[in-house]
Image (tube, grey):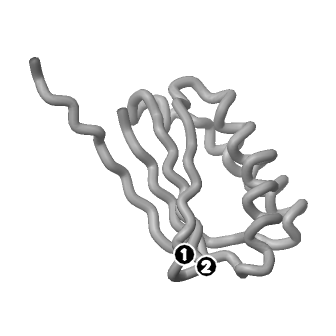
């Protein structure tokens, strides 16, 4: 399993709207992609503008095979409905360790 970590800075006053729209637009679109296993939202109680998404993929190949055009279309839809775009502050990839038996 591969973990995609994405961190954004979101105005705390818009955070709830941002999260609802993300679920309706991004999560719904990603759920249709092969290898998508789930998504979590982490909120930092000390820094209310920080939003972290943890997205689980079956394989790196599944994650990286998402068509760029699909990502672009989903981002445009999200930005249009949100009224602006948000830049990724941090991104990372992690492998889930599975010990050999």
Circle 1: is it few (<14), some (14-19), or many (20+) Cα within 10 Å?
few
The residue sitting at 61% across, 79% down in the picture is: 48
Answer above or below: position of 94 versus 101.
below
Vertical arrangement, residue 3 with respect to residue 1, above or below: below
Q: Nearer the viewer, residue 88 or 37?
A: 37
Within 10 Å of disc 2 (Cα), the crowding (few <14, some 14-19, many 20+) is some
* Furthest residue in direction top, as rendered: 101
Measuring 81% from the left and 55% from the top, which residue is drawn there? 21
Kindly report which numbered mark, 2 or 1, lies closer to the viewer in this rendering. 1
In percent of width and height, residue 31 lies at: 66, 32
Q: Residue 47: horizontal and vertical position, in percent?
A: 54, 81
Residue 85 in view (yes/no): yes
Is the Cβ of the residue at disc 2 closer than 8 Å to that at disc 1?
yes
* Left or right: 27 in relation to 63: right
SS class of the residue under badge 2? loop
Residue at screen point 37% across, 38% down: 2
Q: Quadrant of residue 60?
A: top left
Tag count: 2
Q: Which residue is mark 1?
A: 45
Residue visible at 46% across and 69% down in the picture: 90
Q: Which residue is mark 2?
A: 48
81, above or below 84, in the image: above
Give how far across and how far down residue 88 sits, in percent. Answer: 56, 68
- Among the 4 quarters of the image, the one containing residue 5: bottom left
Q: Nearer the viewer, residue 59 or 12?
A: 12
Tag on residue 83?
Answer: none
- Residue 98 horizontal/vertical position (percent): 21, 30
Image-based side of 58 in relation to 100, left or right: right
């Amino acid at each position: 399993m591969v973990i995609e970590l994405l961190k954004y800075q979101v105005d705390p006053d818009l955070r709830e709207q941002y999260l609802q729209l993300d679920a309706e637009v991004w999560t719904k679109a990603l759920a249709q992609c092969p290898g998508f296993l789930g998504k979590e939202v982490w909120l930092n109680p000390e820094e209310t503008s920080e939003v972290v998404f943890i997205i689980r993929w079956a394989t790196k190949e599944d994650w990286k095979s998402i068509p760029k055009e699909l990502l672009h279309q989903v981002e445009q839809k999200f930005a249009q409905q949100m009224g602006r775009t948000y830049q990724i502050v941090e991104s990372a990839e992690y492998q889930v360790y599975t010990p050999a038996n």
